[in-house]
Amino acid sequence: MSSFKQLSKADVTSVSYAANKQWTLPFSCPSLSNGYFNIYKGTFITGAFSSDNFSTDPITNGQYERLVYDSINHLFYQKFSGSLDTGSLMFNVTTYEFASQQHPTGAYFDYNTNPLLIKNFPTGANAGIRVLSIDQDIYGSKVLPNSFVLSSSAYYITDDGYGNLFGSGSAHVGNIFYAHGLAIVTNPDYQEMFPLPPIAVNNIATFLTSDTSVKTIPILANDISRSCVLDTGSVVLSGSNAAYYTVNANGTITLNTSASGNYDVYYTVNSLCSNGCSLTSNKAKVSVNVISVNPPPCITVEFMGGKPDQTFYYVECGSSTTSSLTLNDTDYPVQKCIDADFGVSGSSLYTYVGACGSGVTASSGCSLYLLCAADRAPNAEFYYTTCSGTPVTESFGTSGDCYLDANYRCITGSITLANPYGSYTLINLHCS
């Protein structure tokens, strides 16, 4: 038969026990992020902050380099001028280092007051640091002093138990803040052990609905490869508009629509390192707009041949290429609907037809007629009513050639030929 004895609180003693676990975190291909740690880059950048200009404010591993530098400097290295007014403070101020009386807050806490700590923080223009941030599930309450080792084929770095990191030959590499699981590499000679991914830079492109050329955007033209070489075949598009694009082998993208609208898309690109590792850039934005514009004004002209042969140069409506036409004096005239902005060059033997009808709808009853003079005496006479409602009697002299003496009139209703010496033709003016 079992029995139980009740213990009083006086019989119970609690003793804390620190369990130190050794971790080996391999990174044969130096990814900036895995389940154990993250690697960030900090850069000293002056001037106004620009959240959408990655060439001046780059992002590495999802963090702005300017902010990483400023945060590490602010929390662990920066010294502030001015004296601290401690009269109203009710705590030990030895952990506040050169705080000013305006800022006696925890933001300026000195996390390591050990006099053996060496702080060599770079402050020159564009100076950089690397930050190795260990996941707290790995280091727990803190990293055990004298247990940190960072090694590769080229480096062997250890901590000295006081928060300093040293490489071979006692070179000071940086610092480790044990309670935060942060190793800061401040020595530039040791920062290349962590290759940097490329920087993808935002792009802007604008097209017109009238553009007939291929809409290709060289999105990698301004990207920065940094430690490795850009892999042009690694571009990955994302966003709701990605289906409108084709990714080309040379790293460009092609927009496959001419409809007006906004077609913003996002992309990343990889770089290939000499050891075969692939690093992925930040996500950059390509801002693309297709703008609707009115088509160029179109007119109808009639080309007439002559001696010597006449060659005309023009651009047909809806086209962007120059066309040519050659006629001699025995060819019938040819009507073309052309781009009015381009006009006609090469010969002056053409007649402008499009003045009538461009603003006339079919319901108005207006039509364009070509009136031809008589080819023998007497003169040809025509009776008609203009689109404005004015009755007209008009006669043309003899010419022997109807087309070279052609006359275009906009007429409503019917037309009457008073004698058999002339002719007229209904012209279809609609250009599409």
Image: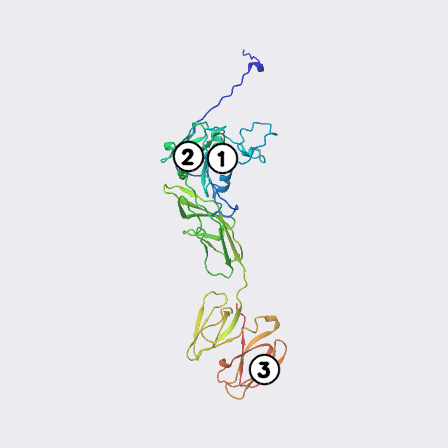
Q: Earlier in the sequence, mark 3 or mark 2?
A: 2
Asked if residue 66 can be seen in this view, the reply is yes
Residue 289 vs 136, above or below: the answer is below
Q: Secondary structure at mark 1?
A: helix
Which residue type does callout 3 highlight?
Thr
Q: Residue 88, position in %: x, y?
A: 61, 30
The answer to whether mark 2 and mark 1 are in CB contact below 8 A is no
Q: Which residue is mark 2?
A: 173
Q: Of tags 3 and 1, which is closer to the observer?
A: 1
Mark 3 vs 2: CB contact within 8 A: no
Under tag 3, what secondary structure?
Answer: strand
Residue displayed at 39% across by 38% down = 189
| Crowd class of label 1 (few under 14; some 14 to 19; many from 20; radius 10 Å) | some
Residue 71 appears left or right of 385:
left
Quadrant into which the N terminus falls: top right
Disc 1: which residue: 77
Dot placed on the residue nearer the N-terminal end, 2 or 1? 1
Q: Is residue 33 visible?
A: no
Front residue of 420 and 326 = 326
Residue at 42% from the left image edge and 34% from the top image edge = 173
**Relative to the observer, which residue lies in front, 170 or 94?**
94
73 is higher (above) or lower (below) than 338 = above
Q: Label for residue 416?
A: 3
